[in-house]
Every structure is written in C-alpha cells, then in structure tokens.
C-alpha cells in the first residue's frame, strides 16, 4: 500500500508516494537513483548501506521508508558542499583509504557520525566505532588513519 512520505534528503525536501514498508536502501537506490548507498549483506551487519539519519549512522537496509518520515537523511552524495569535500572524505583521499570503494560510503558516514559525537576520538575509539563496518580489501589501517587525522585536526 502506497503512502505519502516526506523527509529531508541531503538538505532538500522530498515528498513521494511509495510503499511505506519498502527499505530505505532500495528506496534510495531504485526510486531516487542514489547508488552511493551500497547493498552488502541486507542484514545490517556489514555497514555498506550506512546513511545518516538526523546525523546518526543508521543501516538503510534495516529501516523502512515510513521510519524516516519528517527526519533528515544524508547519503554520501549529500555530504560534500558543492565541490568541497567533507573533511572525512578529504582525509580518505589524502590517506588512500578507498581501495575498492565499496565500503567507503558507509565507512565515511559512520566516521562522520562518530566524530560528531566524539570529535577528539582516539585511535581506539575509531577502531571501536568503525568495527561494524566491514572492509574486505585491506584498507582498514588507512581508513583508521584517515579518520584519526580528522580527529587530530579538530584538536587544533
């Protein structure tokens, strides 16, 4: 059954009729053609589908569209401001932390959420905070280094 769902996506209002129980992941990918949010496990375990909901990292595969009504959702496509990358995105580039790129959007959004909550995160905090985002290609040490560089910059 279709339902009108209104929310803010990447800073812009969205109002669409959709199946209210459709997963946010497939709504973003199929209906809105925002493919930065990746399908990984479909069970909320890998973190590939991470988005920010009201600034907090959430697994889009576990959320239905109805649950985001009147909320703010940010995908990887909405993180940069124009041509200016978000500091976490820039740190990933500078630290070569995007080897295959599949986990990267989820890692970046999880890191943004982590640093919003704990701007001075230690390496241990970062490792713990990103533990639920899986990287299979071996870039995990560079990912932690990238996030740590942003945390260290916030101390300046």
Image: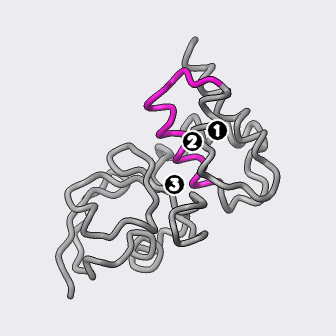
- CB-based contact (under 8 Å), mark 2 and mark 1: yes
Residue drawn at x 18%, y 79% as measured from the top left: 3
Q: In the image, is residue 85 part of the stretch drawn in magenta?
A: no
Q: Which residues are magenta?
A: 104-122
Picture layout, residue 38 above or below residue 92: below
Q: Is residue 74 left or right of residue 129?
A: left
Residue identified by numbered label 2: 85
Picture layout, residue 129 above or below residue 104: above
For label 2, the crowd category at 10 Å Cα-Cα, with few meaning under 14, some 14 to 19 and many 20 or more, is few
User: Which is nearer the eye, 35 or 25?
Assistant: 25
Give the dominant element type of the magenta stretch: helix, strand or loop: helix
Residue identified by numbered label 3: 76
Query: Mark 2 or mark 3: which comes first in sequence?
Result: 3
Quadrant where the N terminus lies? bottom left
Give the x, y percent position of residue 33.
Answer: 46, 74
Residue drawn at x 53%, y 72% as measured from the top left: 42
Q: In the image, is residue 109 part of the stretch drawn in magenta?
A: yes
Give the x, y percent position of residue 68.
Answer: 28, 61
- State the separation of the CA atoms marked 2 and 1: 6 Å
Residue drawn at x 20%, y 57% as measured from the top left: 70
Residue identified by numbered label 1: 90
Residue drawn at x 73%, y 33% as measured from the top left: 145
């Amino acid at each position: 059954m279709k339902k009108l769902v209104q929310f803010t996506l990447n800073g812009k209002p969205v109002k669409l009729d959709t199946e209210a129980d459709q997963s946010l992941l497939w709504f973003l990918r199929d209906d809105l053609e925002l493919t930065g949010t990746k399908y990984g496990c479909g069970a909320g375990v890998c973190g590939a589908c991470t988005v920010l909901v009201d600034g907090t990292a959430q697994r889009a595969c576990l959320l239905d569209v109805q649950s985001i009504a009147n909320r703010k959702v940010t995908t990887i496509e909405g993180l940069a401001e124009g041509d200016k990358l978000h500091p976490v995105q820039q740190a990933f580039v500078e630290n070569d932390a995007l080897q295959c790129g599949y986990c990267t959007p989820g890692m970046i959004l999880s890191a943004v959420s982590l640093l919003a909550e704990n701007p001075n995160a230690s390496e241990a905090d970062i490792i713990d905070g990103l533990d639920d985002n899986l990287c299979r290609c071996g870039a995990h040490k560079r990912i932690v280094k990238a996030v740590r560089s942003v945390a260290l910059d916030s101390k300046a």
